[in-house]
Amino acid sequence: MKTVNVNRPALADLGPDLLATGPGRRALALARPAAGIALYAAVAWAAPSRPALWLLAPVVVFGIFVAVVTVTHDVVHRAIGLGSRGTEWALFLCGLALFESGHAYRATHLQHHRRFPGDDDPEGHPARLSALGAVLYGPVFLFRLWWWALRRTRSERGWLLAEAAALPVAATAGVLLWPHTPAVLLYVVLAVAGSWVYPLLTVHLPHDRHGDSPLTQTGTLRGRIVPAVFLELTYHLEHHLYPQVPSHHLAELSRRLDPFLAANGVRPRRVP
């Protein structure tokens, strides 16, 4: 499919403040995954005496997913002011929180921005599947992204191999620790199972029925509760138009883009 270009407003005209990330905001973004893991550890510590607390485990892990995906997204696009060394370590450590490869994600996500909806976009592949196909693709999605990145880079192979080792090491530790606590293995299972929804939630649904224009290749969800729960990741169209804008400014970006989108017939989907 040939992409039709659109004359979008220059980011300088929308406001250079949309690129600003202060030290406090950066620290908050980077601290959220660690805070989520600490909360999970607290639940696991208290659960033996209060077994009902185990019901909170999936909720906490969901929060960790949102925190990791959001900050990794910003790190990949160099949107929160990290230097080169900080970027590499942030990709590694944030991915480690969910036994994923931050470096594979960077390689494939930047390719997604360059090439969607082309056949040479491995991250965007689920957009060409049915909803059921995207669900069934879940168990192999991250591996295929990692393998694509491994075959195309030499300088980052050390990072990629180290990141690939995280899951088997964590799973082995979980099995060995099972007689003492189920917390580690449960976390591994929840992290792996949670990653299976990536193709559906982060690719297929945002890009479903994509058109041939940057304004029709992805959707956007507007509201108060849902975007806040997902730390503004629902503003997918705005992100594709201006990937250098950090997630914490996407809501404001959407407001400033409203006249342009309305003039071009784009109607954002409203959610709670």
Image (cartoon, helix red, strand yellow):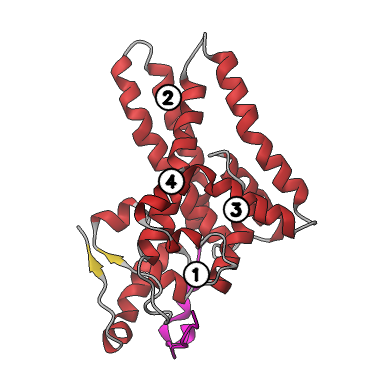
Q: Which residue is mark 2?
A: 42
In primary-sequence order, the first of circles 2 and 1 is 1
Q: Nearer the viewer, residue 199 or 133?
A: 133
Q: Which residue is mark 3?
A: 145
Q: Which of label 4 and label 1 is nearer to you?
A: 4
Q: Secondary structure at mark 1?
A: loop
Q: Looking at the image, can residue 90 be seen?
A: no
Q: Secondary structure at mark 3?
A: helix
Q: Which mark is residue 20?
A: 1
How far is disc 4 from disc 3 in space, using C-alphas? Answer: 16 Å
Please state the extent of the stretch shown in magenta in the rendering: 1-23
- In the image, residue 158 sits, relative to residue 260, either above or below, namely above
How far is disc 4 from disc 2 in space, using C-alphas? Answer: 33 Å
- In the image, residue 201 sits, relative to residue 266, either above or below, namely above
Label 1 crowd (10 A; few <14 / some 14-19 / many >=20): some
Point 59% across, 14% down: residue: 176
Q: Nearer the viewer, residue 252 or 199?
A: 199
Point 47% across, 48% down: residue: 137
Q: Which residue is mark 4?
A: 136
Q: Which mark is residue 232?
A: none
Marks 2,1: beta carbons within 8 A: no
In primary-sequence order, the first of circles 3 and 2 is 2
In primary-sequence order, the first of circles 4 and 3 is 4
Instruction: Decide whether the magenta segment is chiefly helix, strand or loop.
Output: loop
Point 55% across, 39% down: residue: 97
Compared across the picture, whether 156 is left or right of 220 comes to: right
Q: Secondary structure at mark 2?
A: helix
How far is disc 1 from disc 3 in space, using C-alphas? Answer: 31 Å
In primary-sequence order, the first of circles 1 and 3 is 1
Q: x, y percentage for residue 163?
A: 66, 42
